[in-house]
Amino acid sequence: MRRFDKRIESQLVAEKSRGVLESPAPSNGTHGGSSDAVMDSRALIPPLGLREYWYPALPAKKVGKCPLFWVMLGDELVFFRDRQGQVVALTDVCPHRGASLSEGACFYRGYLTCPYHAATFDESGKCVAMLTEGPDSKMVGRLKARVYPTQQVRDWIFVWMGEGDPVPIEEDVPEEFFDPDVVVVCNYMYWATNWMMATENHGDAHNQLFVHRNAVSALLTAHPGRSRTPYGPETKTIGDQALLMLRDEGDYYATEKNGTAPYQLYYPGVDGVWPLHRWRLLWAWFFKRLMKPNPLKTSEEWGYGHHMPCIQRTATSFSGTNSLWAVAVRPNLSRIVQFHAVRPPNRAVYFWEMLSWKLFRAWMSYNFVSGDNAAIAPCRWWTPENLSSTDSHLVKLRSFVLTHSRDALRRQAQKGGNGQAGRTAKAGGTEAMATAGSIES
């Protein structure tokens, strides 16, 4: 029955190479069939994300009376509540002997006690008691755990992951979060891929037509996503914060009859059309008005495209605006946090928005984006790429991250502004741009 053989083969599939290599690629060509590690701008992008930013961590309601373990950007954190009930984040590593603080307990309201030698910490990370050594312990006031600044916005806890002083949180969180007339709901999931691959995917030019063709929302609308075209979108940078997509040559295959591209296009290489069937269009007439995008009006900075450090802004199929964060957890694991914002004109619409989100829209959103995880999780980050001209936004995004992020600017400032770090980052972006240009030519 070959059960043993099938088990081995299944294990080989489960362990196949993917994502970011945690060690350099071997010289014998084991990975990806190539003996050369990637030498373009990807090698300069930190596999655990950009540090000098605020990130959404978790819903505030997840933090209760007991300490909670969490991982962000490779750092192991512990969350608990201080004496005023505010959420606090410390490193999970006890500075005494390296024990896990999340395995401890909050015996006293607002304080976290280590499970090993009972070092007890307050919201500032300062050791205020060492229960095993008595009230006269010399560790009191001398032992300190790292604190990660936190702020609550809406129902979510945001954490500053940087080494520098936190910037005003309004710089990193979409402006509608601070508008009392806007309703914001949230959903999150995990993708088995690197944060940068997830971020790039969020702005992918054409994958809805193929990757998401069987998602419920795609089936209901028969919408192909961005228009098919062999050209990449035009883009615009907004300071050091945003890289926006302006247009994508959507009329490339448009016909003179109605000015739009047909649902099915003929591909001479396979002597066939795609999509294969037209039956999906049967639903479109019914759902066309219901799922017509009605995005929020925003400032140019918070327009539709990429926003530092890992946010993609899009209009939704129903109404409102989506903000998707790709938060690094491990080198090949990302937490995808999706905020949906809408401005209801009255209370009836407000209740409908909340009810529909809980009943089916949150699930439909999860159903749609989970297809991306299946598609990009097996992708190899280190192999040489042959980029299409439609990947022009991807190339610009990588260069933008390497030259405009606060991490890059901080390194450049430490090196004297025009030091080696700045030249290396710009060279990496230029090399990737040249690669895309050669393929386009």
Image: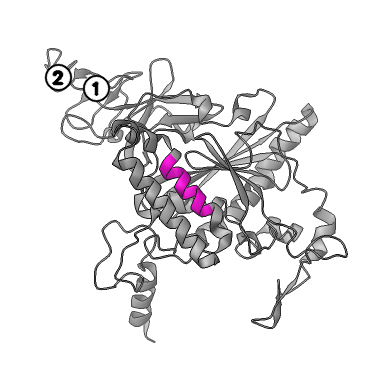
Q: Could you tell me which quadrant the C terminus lies in?
A: bottom right
Q: Residue at x 40, y 63 (%)?
A: 380
Please give the range of residues in magenta. Answer: 394-403
Measuring from the top left, give residue 325's x and y in whole percent. 51, 42
Please name the residue shown 12% across and 12% down the image: 136
Residue type for callout 2: Met
Left or right: 271 in relation to 29: right
The residue under label 2 is 139
- Crowd around label 1: few <14 · some 14–19 · many ≥20 (10 Å): many
Residue drawn at 88 percent across, 65 percent down? 257
Q: Nearer the viewer, residue 243 or 223?
A: 243
Q: Position of residue 385 (x, y in %)?
A: 44, 65
Q: Give residue 356's position: percent from left, percent from top.
A: 71, 42
Amino acid found under the numbered disc labelled 1: Thr
Where is residue 54 shown, x and y percent of the image? 45, 31
Q: Residue furthest right?
A: 257
Left-right relation of 135 to 369: left
Residue depth check, mark 2 versus mark 1: number of the one nearer the observer: 2
**Vertical order, 260 against 12 (above or below):** above
Q: Secondary structure at mark 2?
A: loop
Earlier along the polypeptide chain: callout 2 or callout 1?
1
Tell me where residue 65 sits by quadrant.
top left
